[in-house]
Image (cartoon, grey):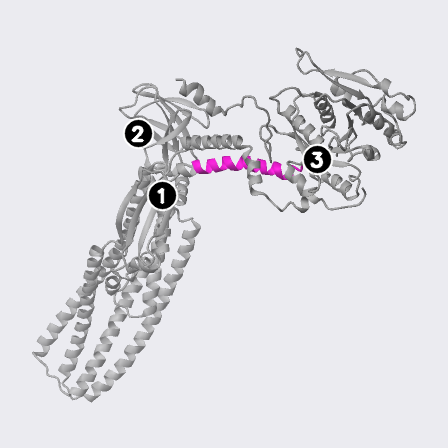
């Protein structure tokens, strides 16, 4: 018994029977169905109390086909807005999600004011147009002074008055409709709808705009819906879809207005600069024309023909270059004066300067000024970002000044070089009349001023046309709309998930229970461990200690009658005229005494003389089951030599399950006597064979209720006297690893001294796991649904 062996049950545990596993769970199908009904009901309740969200969606197209016209017209700053749509759609998405734009939209739509009404135990958000009471700010700017949410409960007292309660502070006051009410952030006017009536209750929540803005940023769903296109989808989930529609449409419109406003700022600033220059150049041009007229009159010159074509052509080339450089110097002067008088203003973007670094620096300077102006709309100059932009603008301003000085120096040097070349050419044509030379000086100056004047006129016209006629960058493909089918919660998904959870919970509990349940469950589990020992029968769950053996409808009585038949089959009459049967088990509590007593009565029912021996002298239970309270002498006294006559210690028991019955069953019992201090030694002295011989000589059957073999060795000391050992295994009680005791006995040959059969106890007669046990020919109880149909539907 001390040898270690692997648990044979777990050696074959991988041989899983799917049908057996399924039946194991289906036994509890009622609990699974009940759980699914409960969780589905909870899911249905969740659908009823959860506010439904709807998806509002709009589609916009970013125009990218007008860039060339904008760049051609000399407006690279404006063309940048279109360039975003071509290659930087993610920037457009971020612009639509910007706090600056959304806060403007929320302010205009009053979305930081939320209305709700009681609907039973729950509150439901409603539109402002549907609320019995709504509010207006006396000063719209006070919306930005709200630093925390204010929750108000307003009850209409009568047509003119209302009662308002601050839910957070519990303060309550009375007010008049249409008259301002002071709050920490400003004055509010309460107004009532004509359809409202006294007693109507409205819950009003006034929230900080920044909080609502951040919520809207999180709720906005903006994405590019075409792979290589410029179409953007703008969506938003909301309990109030009409508000979401308004927000999306106004958000797109607000972005378009901002872009147009930026265009106009650059255009108007450039036009103002050109107009200032034109007024000055117009005076210079007038003076030059007057000098030309005066020179011609004084010198009496009508027309001068060109002489010396080569020198004259060279002179013309140099003069043309001198004219261009002179224009550049004039533009440098104008730009320097403008920068000096307008440090942080937008600079004219392309007025004719040809230096690439100046144009680039001017462009970056204007972008910084625009960004700073936008930030100042929603913050102060003390904002760190604004201060940083001021530093960058100042640096760019200084860079512009240095660039202009450098450009002036290089231009002056170029003019000096050209002047030297002109002097050389003048020497070559010194023979030309002095009149012609003087005329050319005046004419050159006149041409220079006139060219500059015409250039500025052209730029002003281009800027006015571009500012007025540039098409919108954003085109609305679909205005915001929403479907009446909510996107959350999805009823079929919630109900499906609820039912799945209802299925998983009991199955999970059962799985955990089965996982940690190490009890023997069925005959199949026993066969895996001890396939060579026959099974002799099944005993249903015990309802009483003694079964009504005479009943024809009792499954327990039928089970013992089958056991009697099987015992006689294994112990035939011709070979075993008298039969000695031991009833044992692995541990106590498996029903040895219950089986011994009822088997004895079952044998007595066949008119057999039966002796029931209380062979467990350590923990006798036969007398307790039979209701015998007398302390009788028996086996212990005989084994110890205190008594010698066994016949005098035999007690006859007459028993009838039905007290009105005229006949009763009789069995004789030999009790264990007093519990000895040395039971094993007493059983080893050989006198127990005399007790068995006494039984064989006087009775047809000797039933011995023995001690459990997995706990003590008593039974193994006397098992050589038995014809058969009924090895009792109680399902849902005996642990699987205890089956090793039976395997070890078989391996050691201790079961070879007699016939051994396994008897399974505690079987569920209503359909236990692994098998169903029912006997009898009485009326079978119909299922509940068949009874319902027969009793209520068919009869009606």
Picture disc at residue 758: 3
Q: Residue at x 85, y 24 (%)?
A: 635
Structural crowding at the residue carrying mark 1, measured as other residues with C-alpha within 10 Å and reported as few (<14), some (14–19) or many (≥20) = many
For marks 3 and 1, give the CA distance.
Answer: 72 Å
Is residue 418 shown left or right of residue 782? left
Q: Nearer the viewer, mark 3 or mark 2?
A: 3
| x and y percentages locating residue 645 in the rendered image | 89, 20
Picture disc at residue 81: none
Please identify the quadrant where the C terminus is shown: top left
Task: Please state which of residues 733 and 644 is positioned toward the viewer in this rendering.
Answer: 644
For marks 3 and 2, give the CA distance.
Answer: 80 Å
- Up the image or down, 250 lies above or below 63; here it is above
Task: Please state which of residues 176 and 637 is positioned toward the viewer in this rendering.
Answer: 637
Check residue 480 for magenta coloring. Answer: no
| x and y percentages locating residue 344 in the rendered image | 34, 56
Secondary structure mostly seen in magenta is helix
Q: Nearer the viewer, mark 2 or mark 1?
A: 1
In the rendered structure, which disc, 2 or 1, sits on the residue that comes first in sequence? 2
Q: Which residue is mark 2?
A: 130
| x and y percentages locating residue 319 in the rendered image | 21, 79
Segment colored magenta? 495-518
Picture disc at residue 236: 1
């Amino acid at each position: 018994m001390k040898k270690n062996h692997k648990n044979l049950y777990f050696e074959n545990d991988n041989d899983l029977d799917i049908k057996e596993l399924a039946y194991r769970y289906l036994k509890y199908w009622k609990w699974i169905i009940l759980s699914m009904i409960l969780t589905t009901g909870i899911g249905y309740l969740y659908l009823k109390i959860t506010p439904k969200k709807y998806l509002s969606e709009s589609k916009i197209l970013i125009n990218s086909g007008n860039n060339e016209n904008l760049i051609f017209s000399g407006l690279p700053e404006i063309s940048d807005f279109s360039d975003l749509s071509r290659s930087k759609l993610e920037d457009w998405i971020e612009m639509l999600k910007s706090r600056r734009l959304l806060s403007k939209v929320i302010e205009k739509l009053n979305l930081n004011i939320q209305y709700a009404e009681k609907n039973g135990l729950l509150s439901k958000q409603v539109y402002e147009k549907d609320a019995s009471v709504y509010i207006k700010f006396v000063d719209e700017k006070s919306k930005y002074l709200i630093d925390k949410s204010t929750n108000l409960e307003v009850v209409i007292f009568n047509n003119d008055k209302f009662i308002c309660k601050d839910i957070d502070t519990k303060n309550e006051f009375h007010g008049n409709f249409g008259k301002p009410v002071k709050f920490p952030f400003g004055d509010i006017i309460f107004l009532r709808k004509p359809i409202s009536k006294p007693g109507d209750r409205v819950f009003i929540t006034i929230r900080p705009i920044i909080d609502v803005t951040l919520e809207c940023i999180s709720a906005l769903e903006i994405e590019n819906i075409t792979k290589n296109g410029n179409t953007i989808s703008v969506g938003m989930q909301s309990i109030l879809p009409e508000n979401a529609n308004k927000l999306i449409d106004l958000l797109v419109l607000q972005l378009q207005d901002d872009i147009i406003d930026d265009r106009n700022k650059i255009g108007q600033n450039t036009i103002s600069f050109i107009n200032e220059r034109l007024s000055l150049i117009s005076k210079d041009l007038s003076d030059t024309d007057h000098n030309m007229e005066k020179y011609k009159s004084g010198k009496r010159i009508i027309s001068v023909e060109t002489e010396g074509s080569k020198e004259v052509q060279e002179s013309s080339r140099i003069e043309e270059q001198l004219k261009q450089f002179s224009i550049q110097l004039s533009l440098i002067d104008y730009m320097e004066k403008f920068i000096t008088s307008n440090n942080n203003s937008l600079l004219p973007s392309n007025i004719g300067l040809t230096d690439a670094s100046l144009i680039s620096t001017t462009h970056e300077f204007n972008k910084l000024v625009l960004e700073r102006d936008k930030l100042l709309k929603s913050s102060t100059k003390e904002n760190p970002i604004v201060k940083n932009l001021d530093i960058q603008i100042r640096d760019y301003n200084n860079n512009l000044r240095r660039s202009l000085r450098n450009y002036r120096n290089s231009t002056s040097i170029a003019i000096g070089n050209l002047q030297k070349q002109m002097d050389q050419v003048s020497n070559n044509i010194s023979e030309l009349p002095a009149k012609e030379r003087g005329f050319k000086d005046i004419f050159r100056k006149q041409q220079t001023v006139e060219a500059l004047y015409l250039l500025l006129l052209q730029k002003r016209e281009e800027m006015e046309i571009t500012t007025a006629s540039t098409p919108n960058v954003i085109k609305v493909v679909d205005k915001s709309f929403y479907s009446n089918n909510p996107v959350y919660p999805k009823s079929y998904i919630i109900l499906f998930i609820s039912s799945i959870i209802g299925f998983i919970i009991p199955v999970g509990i059962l799985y955990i229970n089965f996982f940690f349940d190490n009890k023997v469950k069925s005959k199949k589990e026993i066969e895996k461990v001890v396939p060579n020992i026959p099974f002799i029968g099944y005993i249903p769950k015990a309802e009483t200690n003694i079964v009504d053996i005479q009943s024809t409808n009792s499954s327990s009585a039928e089970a013992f009658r089958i056991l009697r038949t099987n015992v006689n089959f294994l112990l035939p009459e011709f070979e075993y005229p008298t039969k000695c049967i031991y009833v044992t088990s692995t541990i106590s509590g498996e029903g040895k005494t219950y089986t011994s007593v009822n088997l004895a009565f079952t044998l007595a029912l066949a008119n057999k003389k039966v002796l029931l021996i209380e062979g467990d002298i350590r923990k006798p239970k036969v007398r307790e089951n039979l209701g015998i309270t007398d302390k009788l002498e028996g086996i212990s006294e005989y084994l110890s030599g205190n008594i010698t006559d066994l016949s005098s210690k035999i007690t006859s028991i007459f028993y009838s399950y039905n007290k009105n019955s005229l006949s009763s069953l009789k069995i004789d019992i030999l009790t264990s006597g007093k519990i000895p201090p040395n039971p094993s030694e007493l059983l080893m002295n050989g006198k127990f064979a005399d007790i068995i011989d006494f039984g064989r000589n006087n009775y047809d059957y000797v039933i011995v209720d023995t001690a459990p073999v997995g706990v003590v060795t008593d039974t193994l000391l006397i098992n050589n006297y038995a014809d058969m050992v009924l090895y009792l295994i109680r399902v849902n009680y005996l642990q699987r690893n205890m089956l090793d005791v039976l395997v070890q006995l078989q391996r050691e040959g201790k079961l070879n001294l007699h016939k051994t059969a396994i008897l399974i106890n505690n079987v569920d007669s209503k359909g236990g796991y692994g098998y169903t046990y029912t006997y009898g020919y009485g009326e079978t109880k119909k299922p509940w649904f068949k009874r319902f149909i027969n009793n209520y539907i068919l009869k009606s």
